[in-house]
Amino acid sequence: MQKLKKSQIQMGESVAILFIFFILLIFGFVFYMRVMRSSTEIEIEENIQLKAIGIAQKASFLPELQCSEENVRVEDCIDLYKLEAASKLLEENNIYYYDIFEFSKIWVKEIFPETNKTWPLYNNKLTNYSNKLSTFIPVSLFNATAKKYDFGILAVEVYTK
Amino acid sequence: MKKRAVIELQFNWIFVLIAGAIIFVFFISIVNKQREFSELKTSGTIITNLESILTGAQISTNTVNIVDMPKIDVGFECDRYFIGPVPKQTKGNVIFSPNLLKGKEIITWALDWNMPYRVTNFLYITDPELRYVIVYDDDTETIARKIDKELPKEMNKELIDKLENLKNKNNYKVKFIFLTDASDNDLNDIQSELKMPDEDLTAIELDIGDSGIIPNTGTIDFIQKNGTLWGREKIAYLKKESLFGAIFAADSEMYNCVMRKAFKKLNLVSKIYLNRSSTLADYYGIDNIGCASVHSYAVIELKKMRDASEEELNDFPIGGLGRMDAMMDYSNNIKNENQRAQLFSCALIY
């Protein structure tokens, strides 16, 4: 076997140093990317929760549902006569309300008296969702003719991929 | 020096150069990728935060919020806004804003739009670095002061009665609200004094009389320089909330588009009240003629409101002042019927 020349050995050393340098660099980069990925995942999760709360907020403040007395808003109250009308209207204007509620399912359920009556409001479920966040808002259900309040929940389920 | 040694030395240098260049390019590409990623991430974070702020501002009315922002350009259109390359839909939100916000702060102001029932919240967005100048004369001083008082005090606004008093304050955009006649000569003088490009200097001229109160309906002239001439477009407004919208909107195109969104919402909410009153009229029937008549009259007016808003959501501003006056009449009639409902102890219309 022919003996390696001095310059060839020097060259081999340089290549080896470069190789190790790049290996260390790749290790560092992979580690950094993992840290970045986990922090991005946390951020995405936070954004999903924020979005779910935003949609629930929008649903509970919808003028199409809210009770009012001389145009003064009553917080956490749904007018039953509006609810009956809104149930149909939201279905007919699904595209308009998609801009507000995106992929979610919204309904109102009467809890007391225990009639188990449910009013579906909006249903645009994602078929292959990976995340579902549910928010249940206790509301009073106002009957304008009987002038009495029942108790119910406004349920908002938000779906994300 | 031997020939072989010379070649070896040169080869070494070439090797160092190539390896160095590869390392250099590698680091530059990583830095570039990181910069792009970080810009995108920052824009995304700001957009998410801004969306939460907009949602919050929309559900709490009559509030002014000052939002601290990083020094970043925020672009607004009728249907979306941009931060850097990241766009976000404004969706059904009714937002009046200049087309570009550059400041470190954003002012948001939300007001209820009632016809006479609550329809939606109008959200107004501006920047303290953006200057609003209200120009008045002796006849319109009272109303100018009223408008100035109603607008948020955090806005960069001022009242002037003589255009000669105008000073250049180096604002990146200036909007004039004329309560006097704004002639092309006046506008040219203003432009030469402020030394501003055409697109950054806009004006509206309000034809709202001199009664001292802000009328519910009226017309607004949107003025924008088009080539060498000042283009004007006359558009009607409905209630003072939409008049304020004209003050904040970038131009007539944005104002019309946002108002169409507002009319869409009015149409939907009117349908709800129409259905409700119709059910209530049937419920009271002949057993309670008073309440039945209240809701039956309301149904007639609500139908008119529904139909008018249906036309406006497609045609605005073609209907003009006549249509706005008619809608204001329907609104007043519904309000009167609601008072009658209260008088007869019936379920209220709204």
Image (cartoon, coloured by chain):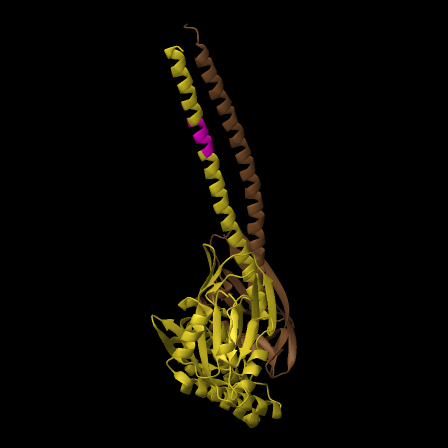
User: As rendered, which of A41 and A150 lies closer to the eye?
Assistant: A41
User: As rendered, which of B229 and B245 lies closer to the eye?
Assistant: B229
Residue A117 visible in the snapshot: no
The image shows residue B203 at horizontal and vertical percentages of 45, 75
Residue B73 visible in the snapshot: yes
The image shows residue A75 at horizontal and vertical percentages of 64, 73
User: As rendered, which of B40 and A78 lies closer to the eye?
Assistant: B40
In the rendered image, which quarter is residue B343 located in? Answer: bottom right
The residue depicted at 42 percent of the width and 85 percent of the height is B321
User: Is residue B23 on the magenta stretch?
Assistant: yes
User: Seen in the image, is A6 located left or right of residue B51?
Assistant: left
The image shows residue B183 at horizontal and vertical percentages of 40, 81
Q: Quadrant of the N terminus of chain B?
A: top left
Residue range in magenta is B18-24
Q: Quadrant of the C terminus of chain B?
A: bottom right
User: Is residue A87 on the magenta stretch?
Assistant: no
Q: Which chain is yellow?
A: B
The residue depicted at 60 percent of the width and 73 percent of the height is B153
Q: In the image, is residue B301 above or below residue B155?
A: below
Chain A is shown in which shade? brown
Q: In the image, is residue B75 above or below residue A9?
A: below
In the rendered image, which quarter is residue B63 located in? Answer: bottom right
Q: What predominant SS class does the magenta segment belong to?
A: helix
